[in-house]
Every structure is written in structure tokens, then in C-alpha cells.
Image (tube, coloured by chain):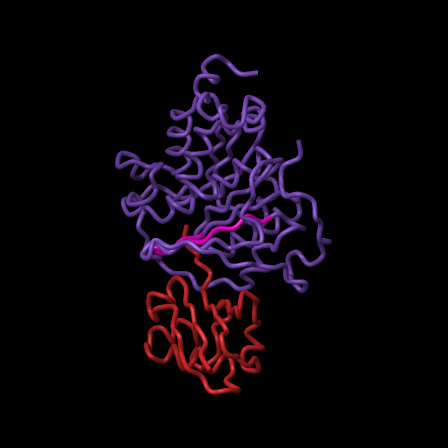
Chain colours: A purple, B red
Amino acid sequence: MFSQRELERYKRQTMLFGEEGQERLKKAHIFIAGAGGLGSPISIYLAVAGVGTITIVDMDVVDQTNLNRQILHFDRDIGKKKTASAEEKLQALNPDITVNAIDVKIEESNAVKLIGKADGIVDAMDNYPTRYLLNDVAIAKKIPLFHGGIRGFYGQATTIIPGTTPCLKCIFPKAPPKEVFPVVGVTPGIIGTIQANEVIKYLLGSGELLTNRLFIWDGMQAHAEELCVERNPACEACSNMTTTKTPARKKK
Amino acid sequence: MTVKIRFFARFRELLGTDIVTEVAPGAMFSSLITTTARKNPAGYAAIFDEKGDFHEFVILMKNGKRIELTDAAKTPVVDGDEIAVFPPVAGG
């Protein structure tokens, strides 16, 4: 049931998917790995949409050099834990949701427990080793992984449904080298918003997900395109999962 | 015969994209990319290692189908092929 305040808050989107759709968002728990460039727009849009429980994990402190893109964090937050800053902003944006902000490094030893009973994992990381770990947990729990990555004016996104679509290792078997990557804030804004849109559609069980397709954005050309991606039968992460044709959406 | 090479992300910054090039019949996938990338040393170094092999993270596609790096030297290109070369984008 919704309070009068919630009914008013979500009025313009229940026009799209009804109170039933809103109920599905409210009951959902989404895990966001990272409160940086991608994690900022993802968490903001999922919070205002009314996703009932958001767990957001980050181990960093807000730095001046983050502020060109990490819009969850303000100048006054420099030196604060990103999780504290994120929790404050998300809860201020929407006091009717639950925000769990966890200040920890996501590692093999804690990933399964951190993700817990979440309905989906959003990849807002800045490195492939942690992404592969999220991919493994998504496969083990049979929950979707909403992937995004950015560099400069370029970005990519895809929605991974274990057993149905290629996993992250099928698409990118080897990690690129680590670097301090250049970036302008609009790029994670664009890619993060696409990831949040995927989460909302998945939870609602409607629309066509970005599955079996790698979305590629070139901000310099203002050009988006997609490449078809396929499961790798020899994939070291997911080849033991039998392919299912189950529709890629959350169960009612 | 002509083929089209499409670079993405960092590779595109260094080498451009939608490069339509004339190739001799029998040309192999990897030699075509090598020749094209040589136009810019930084572009070449982004795609190939010191031994001239593809960096292990490079993704190759021919007409929308994945080509394994190990098969690139023995995969011929044919007239009208569209070739995609891209790196995983890692930032967040």
C-alpha cells in the first residue's frame, strides 16, 4: 500500500505503469556496485523512481577530482565517505525508500553476502576484476547484471541475464589494463541513465531489454549503435549454464 | 576488393573509423588491421603488443560475428566485409 505522499510523488509514472508497477518497484531490492560516475545517476534515478531498497557499495572518499562527474557528491562532501554522502542525498531525494550504503571493498570473500537477496546487480565499477566478480555472483544467484562502462566521450552498456544472454566474460574475456581514464561527466550520465532504465523495465517486466546487444555510445559523433553479442560455449564463467529461453524479466 | 574497418572508443580516437580500404584477394584479417593501424604508432601500440600480436583484451568482429584473436591470422577477408575492432571500456 502507498501513502498519500507516495501516490502524489509517483503520480506521473503510475500514469505509465499503474500502482501495480509502482508496487513492483517498491518491493524490489537493487544492488549498485559503486557510488562514482555511473553509480551517481543510476542511484539517483532508481531512488526517485521508488525502487524500495537500494544497497550502494563504495570504499572511497570524495575527492575534488571526482566532482566533474560524480553528481551525488558536492563540493562540501570532499573528504567524506562516498557512502555517507550517497545515503544522505538519496534519502533526501526520496525519504520513502530504504538506502543501505556500505563502505567496503567488494571482494571474493564478501560479494555473495553483500549482494544477499537483491533482485539485480548494477555494475557501476571502474575496473574489470571487480566486474568479473559481480558477473560470477549474478550467475550463481541467477539474477541480472546491468553492465555499463565509460571512457572519455565513449560508453557501452548491456543487460546480462545469466543462462539467457552472454555473460560479461563471454563478451569481454580479458580485462584491459588499468589506467586513470579521462572522462566528461555527461558520458556516465548517459550510460548510467540507460542502466537505470534497464533496471526499471526489468522490475516492471515490460519492454525490450538491452539483451544480447552491446550498446555503444560515441558522444563526439552523437552516434549510438549496437553490436550483436553471443554466448561463448567455452566461457569459463557461464558455459555450465544451460541456455534457457525464459523471458528475461522479473517473475511476477 | 574493398572492406570497411570500424574502430571504437580509444582506437577510434587514434585511428579514425569507417575506413574503407582496398585489399588484395587472400588478405588475412590480422594483416589488414596491422597495415591500417601502422598509420599511427600510438594507435598501433593500443591494439598490438611489442611482438606484433593483438593485446589479449582486443575484441574483433567480422560482419557482426566474433573472431577469436588466435584465428585472426588465418581468417581471410572477402569483398564487402565489415570489420570491427574495439577495446572493453573500463571506466565508471
Image location (x, y in percent) of residue A59 = 44, 43
Is residue A185 left or right of A131 when viewed as pictured? Answer: left
Span highlighted in magenta in the image: A149-160
Is residue B3 left or right of A139 when viewed as pictured? Answer: left
Q: Nearer the viewer, residue A251 or A115?
A: A251
Q: Is residue B19 magenta?
A: no
Where's the N terminus of chain A, which quadrant? Answer: top right
Quarter residue A168 falls in: bottom right
Instruction: Give the main secondary structure, helix, strand or loop, of the magenta stretch.
Output: strand
Instruction: Give the residue displayed 53% in from the left and 64% down from the top.
Output: A174
Count how many numbered circles sit on residues in the image: 0
Instruction: Give the residue displayed 34% in from the left and 71% down from the top.
Output: B15
Where's the C terminus of chain A, which quadrant? Answer: top right
Image location (x, y in percent) of residue B2 = 44, 79
Instruction: Give the residue displayed 37% in from the left and 44% down from the top.
Output: A189
Q: Is residue A156 magenta?
A: yes
Q: Nearer the viewer, residue A137 or A227?
A: A227
Q: Nearer the viewer, residue A15 or A90?
A: A15
Q: Is residue A151 above or below residue A118?
A: below
Q: Is residue A59 above or below residue A220?
A: above
Is residue A109 left or right of A155 when viewed as pictured? Answer: right
Image location (x, y in percent) of residue A100 = 49, 31
Quarter residue A19 falls in: top right
